[in-house]
Amino acid sequence: MTTSDWLNLNHIWLPYTQMKTAQLPVPVVSARGVHLHLADGRELIDGIASWWTACHGYNHPYVQTKIAEQLKKMPHVMFGGLAHEPAYRLAQRLAAALPGDLNRVFFTESGSVAVEVALKMAVQFWLNQGQRRTKFVSFRHAYHGDTFATMAICDPEEGMHKLFHGVLPDQFVTALPDSKENHNALDHLLAQNRKEIAAVIAEPLIQAAGGMKFHDPEVLIDLKALCDRHGLLLILDEIFTGFGRTGTMFACEQAGVVPDILCLSKALTGGTMPLAATVATNRIYEKFLSDDPEAALMHGPTYMAYPLGCAAANASLDLFESEPRLRQVAAIATQLTDELALCRQAPGVRDVRVKGAVGVVQMDQPVDAVKLRARFVEKGFWIKPFADVIYITPPFVIEERELSGLTRAIEEVLNGR
Ligand SMILES: *Cc1c(COP(=O)(O)O)cnc(C)c1O
């Protein structure tokens, strides 16, 4: 297949890329299972599941069929004043799958927007009770999206949005309560500022784009207890962790913590359609019920509850019921633990860590991401290191020998082979 008539950098603007020195991205013509088929005929095993979305692998025939059925009926219809079955069914199923009384589902089209809606819900929860609270508490290494409100709650020093410091509203960014000292510091911050704080927001168990940092369920338990003690709302951003990635359907289950608001996207549609959800508990939702029309949540993206996306998400949930996804995640965790251990001896490696279907090789220094990526492509693997980590987050359907290929490629590249 020829790419010479379209593949150039004349008009496109690439994500997170310095275009002056940008290299041409790798052209993909189709994908199936864990494989990306390239324009030049080569195949790559995808070690990151297309930014953590393709949990069932690519082109799962069941999801494809369900999307095709919906496409024939109606790819889209506006959500204001009109209803369609895929969204109402999906809302019911998400409420049933999520812990506690996270019962009220608001659909949007991307993760960043789902977080924006969560922040807006939190602010309005207080406004509807006559309280003006404008601040959020988030954590070092946090990543919650690329839009303005979400940039403001990303790590302001090490995160990718540090250039915007001073442009964005200042928020409280501190350490997760993962030690006595950090617990006390957070407790103090919340006590001092509680009247100003609309909510505390965190990524449960794994902070992904901020460096694949892990914390224990106890940290979440403590965080929830601190929020309760100071009467503050807790938002959990499960956009990366949701749908099995950490070993349970949702990461918060491992801590037994039910947040006030929870955000989902990424694997929601099994990596097929852009869709996101912001889910609130009854307590949040009830504060929007009023005789005053202004107390309503004034939000409604044009493609809200996109029917094709909802059909894909329903199909994805079917697969979580009919195929052994969580067992596959457990097997991936065991295999990653065994095989990535070999990387510990390689030069420049500080440590290796695994949680669920996430394997991380932590380097001492930031890596040459572009060079490493090219080395992996030469070997037939799609692995995209960033900052000081080389990680894999494979589709859950990956076979043992394919996963061994990925871990071996990392070990070889680290050892200069
Ligand atoms: C990817 C991600 C987002 C942003 O989602 P987009 O769909 O890229 O806007 C937000 N939070 C977390 C934890 C994410 O991993």
Image: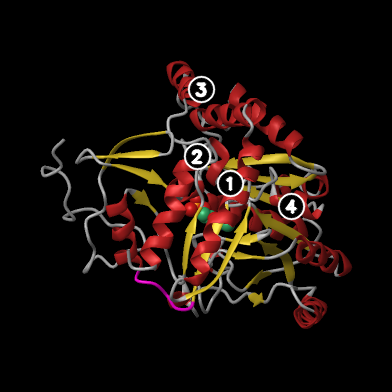
Mark nearest the camera among 4 and 1 is 1
Q: Which residue is mark 2?
A: 398
Q: Of callouts 2 and 4, which one flags the residue occurring earlier in the amino acid sequence?
A: 4
Q: Which residue is mark 4?
A: 252
Residue at mark 2 to residue at mark 4: CA–CA distance: 25 Å
Q: Position of residue 331 (x, y in %)?
A: 62, 43
Q: Of callouts 2 and 1, which one flags the residue occurring earlier in the amino acid sequence?
A: 1
- The answer to whether marks 2 and 1 mark residues whose Cβ atoms lie closer than 8 Å is yes
Q: Position of residue 260 (x, y in %)?
A: 77, 53
Q: Which amino acid type is marked by label 4?
A: Cys
The furthest residue to the right: 229
The furthest residue to the left: 5
> Taking 97 as reference, is 62 above or below it?
above
Please name whichever residue, 398 or 285, is drawn nearer the observer in this view of the structure.
Answer: 398
Q: Of callouts 3 and 4, which one flags the residue occurring earlier in the amino acid sequence?
A: 3
Q: Which residue is mark 3?
A: 62
Mark 3 lies on a secondary structure that is helix
Quarter of the N terminus within the rendering: top left
- The answer to whether marks 3 and 1 mark residues whose Cβ atoms lie closer than 8 Å is no
- The answer to whether marks 4 and 1 mark residues whose Cβ atoms lie closer than 8 Å is no
| Residues in magenta, as a range | 364-368
Q: Specify the quadrant of the image occupied by residue 305.
A: top right
Q: Specify the quadrant of the image occupied by residue 291.
A: top right
Q: Which residue is mark 1?
A: 332
Mark 1 lies on a secondary structure that is helix
Q: Of callouts 3 and 1, which one flags the residue occurring earlier in the amino acid sequence?
A: 3
- The answer to whether marks 3 and 4 mark residues whose Cβ atoms lie closer than 8 Å is no
Is the residue marked by circle 2 packed among few (<14), some (14-19), or many (20+) residues within 10 Å? many
Q: Which amino acid type is marked by label 3?
A: Tyr
Q: Which amino acid type is marked by label 1?
A: Ile
Mark nearest the camera among 3 and 1 is 1
